[in-house]
Image (tube, helix red, strand yellow):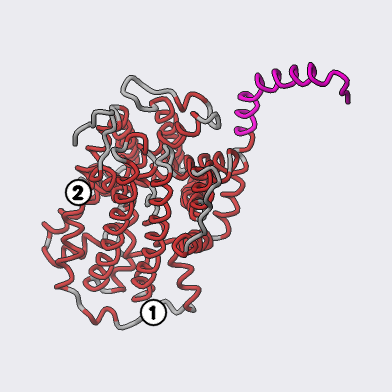
Amino acid sequence: MTTSPNGKSLGLAACTAIVVGNMVGSGFYLSPAAIAPYGNLAIVVWIIMGAGAICLGLTFARLASLVPAVGGPYAYTRLAYGDFAGFLIAWGYWISIWTSLPVIAIAFAGVMIDLFPALGNRFAATLLTLGAIWAIVLVNLRGVHAAGVFAQVTTYAKLVPFGAVAIIGLLFVDTSHFSEFNPSGQPLLQSVAALAPLTMFAYLGLESATVPAGDVRDAERTIPRSTVLGISIAAALYVLGTIVVMGLVPREQLVRSVAPFSEAAGIMWGRSGELAISIAVVLSSIGALNGWTLLMGQVPMAAARDGLFPPLFARLSSRGVPAIGMVVSASFATLLVLVQAIGSEGFAAVYRLMVGLSTMTAVVPYAFCSLAGSLVAARVTNGRRVPRVTAIELVGFIFAMFTLYGSGAEPVLYGLVLLMLGIPVYVWQRRNAAAPVDSKETAAGAATHPAVSG
């Protein structure tokens, strides 16, 4: 990948890799086991959620074509709804990223321990987890170009074994495994609601290409194309991969499996197949860590440049990356890992809750951005043309609301509390930014209206 004369280093391949890399993470590897109790209904929900994700992707693509702004969902929310809404989205989105890093890194450590059983102790697992997080931070500190190259290598490398299972595996499928539509015993709507959070987590990251817009070549065309292409690749992999795993591994065995793709590969190709998938999971976890770490620096940087986040998040290193903000964010992720390693029940409960909140806070921007297109278009054209909300945007909004519903009452409740805790930060930043202006305006007002009094 080359850097263009204007210094923008991310092209179509890199942006698509970031989208696919962020979406196809460690959660996808375990999802067939989680959704196995729901039989064929799970495949239908995968397809429905994929259609909703594509609608959201098209919405983000439209927003990116109107204004390829750094910060992605945050930037579009701020343009459409104003500073406060933009701050809340940036605040929640940032939290969702650094609370997701430990989950991805722990999945990486788990596969490494499976490959090397001698590492199977708490101390080694913690070192592997923290080592993965900070190794990827160091890659991103070298610059956006390095992160983009790394995303391409890890994403396209892991797609080979996963793609082989999803495509070649269709030849090995036992159709008798698909005899029941919904064997869970639950009513249809209840089953769909239960499947929603299990499948929606895999689609998080669909907006990834919009975030580093300032480093994308020909952003107006590259971001929409990479977003739709990345979602389509991931959705096809999810649906076909689930069909193959469910068609190869008996449901009773699949429900208890901790490595469903490895078991499916083992049935087809023996131990070598299992090893190939394990390596793919390692690459998948590292690739997802890389993509989310890139966004972890870009989102608060964009908000800090607008005066909504502390200024330190906007400071760039000599390589042009928001190094301080990235290190601060990774430090919070490290704290979560250490809390989990200590094993205290109270702290562990907080950790589990934060992981659940990361999903909820990541979906909130989708709801805001799904209907933002008309408002952003009006802002771009100075109000001369305000287009109507399209059917695609309405579907995207319904998808976002349904996934929020599927998150469950507790994460949504505590997620709202967490978002509200950002208000003091917003007030502090706005007060500091407005103080000199207010003083001048007060002095000017007193000179213009000397007779006005309280």
Callout 2 amino acid: Tyr
Residue shown at 52% from the left, 59% from the top: 388
Secondary structure under tag 2 reads helix
Please name the residue that numbered disc 1 is placed on.
183
From the image, state whether disc 2 or disc 1 is nearer to you. 2
Residue shown at 49% from the left, 59% from the top: 400
Rendering coords of residue 328 (x, y %): 44, 29
Residue shown at 33% from the left, 36% from the top: 133
Q: Is residue 65 magenta?
A: no
Q: Quadrant of the N terminus?
A: top left
Dot 1, crowdedness within 10 Å: few (<14), some or many (≥20)? Answer: some
Cα separation, mark 2 vs mark 1, equals 36 Å
Residue shown at 87% from the left, 23% from the top: 452
Please name the residue that numbered disc 2 is placed on.
156
Indicate whether 192 appears above or below 340: below
Q: Is residue 451 magenta?
A: yes
From which residue to which does the magenta span run? 425-454
Going by the image, does 252 lie left or right of 432? Answer: left
Tell me, yes or no, if residue 182 can be seen here.
yes
Callout 1 amino acid: Pro
- Residue nearest the observer in this picture, 94 or 342: 94
Magenta region, main secondary structure: helix
Going by the image, does 369 lie left or right of 141? Answer: right
Indicate whether 97 appears above or below 181: above
